[in-house]
Image (cartoon, rainbow, N blue to C red):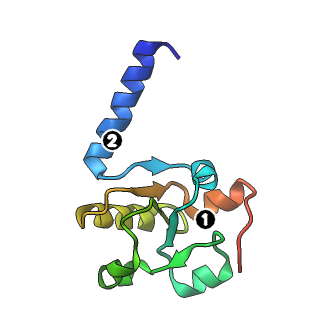
Amino acid sequence: MKPKLYLLALLGLMGAWAQTGYPNLSVQQLRQAPAPRFILDVREPYEFAAGHVAGARLIPLGELAGRLAEIPKNVPVYVICRSGHRSAQASQFLAAKGFRNVHNVQGGLLAWQAAGYPVQK
């Protein structure tokens, strides 16, 4: 990519992040994210039991406000749900509560499985 185009692309990403308070990323980027990391699954318990990303911690979206103390602020937080909608809501909420290293996983578990990545039950 030419330097000028790269700079424009980077500025576009920064603008989107500034509007939401968090960046979106793909399931491929989550899979490659180095440890330490915290994967937050905001689905319901029955959905989590049916299959989840290994190492994910379940805090349903409806319980998130009361369980903020369980989420670390010193490592990247990757928020995932079924399709990316609830995780975007949770990411926005966390960013508004002062979490500065929050990432929304676009496409959620559906995209994770479509990419052929394993789930834990």
Q: Where is residue 81 in the image (x, y as percent from the top left)?
A: 51, 68
Q: In this view, does 36 lie to the left or right of 89?
A: right
Other-residue count near label 1 (Cα within 10 Å), few / some / many at <14 / 14–19 / ≥20: many
92 left or right of 104? left
Q: Check residue 9 in the rendering and tell me which mark sits there, or answer none.
A: none
Q: How far apart are marks 1 and 2 (CA)?
A: 23 Å
Q: Where is residue 94, by image quadrant?
A: bottom left
Q: Where is residue 9 in the image (x, y as percent from the top left)?
A: 41, 27
Q: Where, quadrant-wise, is the C terminus in this rendering?
A: bottom right
Residue 94, compared with residue 44, is above or below; it is: above
Does dot 1 land on a helix, a strand or a loop? helix
Q: In what element is the residue under mark 2?
A: helix
* Nearest to the observer: residue 74 or residue 66: 74
Q: Looking at the picture, how far across and down is residue 66, in whole percent? A: 31, 85
Residue at horizontal 70 percent and vertical 56 percent from the top: 114
Is residue 64 visible from the viewing direction of this image? no
Which residue is labeled 2 in the image?
16
The answer to whether residue 39 is above or below residue 46 is: above
Q: Going from the N terminus, do you reach mark 1 or mark 2 first?
A: 2
Name the residue tied to disc 1: 109
Residue 96 visible? The answer is yes
Q: Where is residue 18 in the image (x, y as percent from the top left)?
A: 27, 44
The reply to whether the C-beta atoms of the residues labelled 1 and 2 are less than 8 Å apart is no
Q: Residue sitting at 40 percent across and 74 percent down?
A: 71
Q: Which amino acid type is marked by label 1?
A: Leu
How many labels sit on residues?
A: 2
- Residue shown at the point (45%, 57%) measured from the top left: 104
Amino acid bearing label 2: Ala
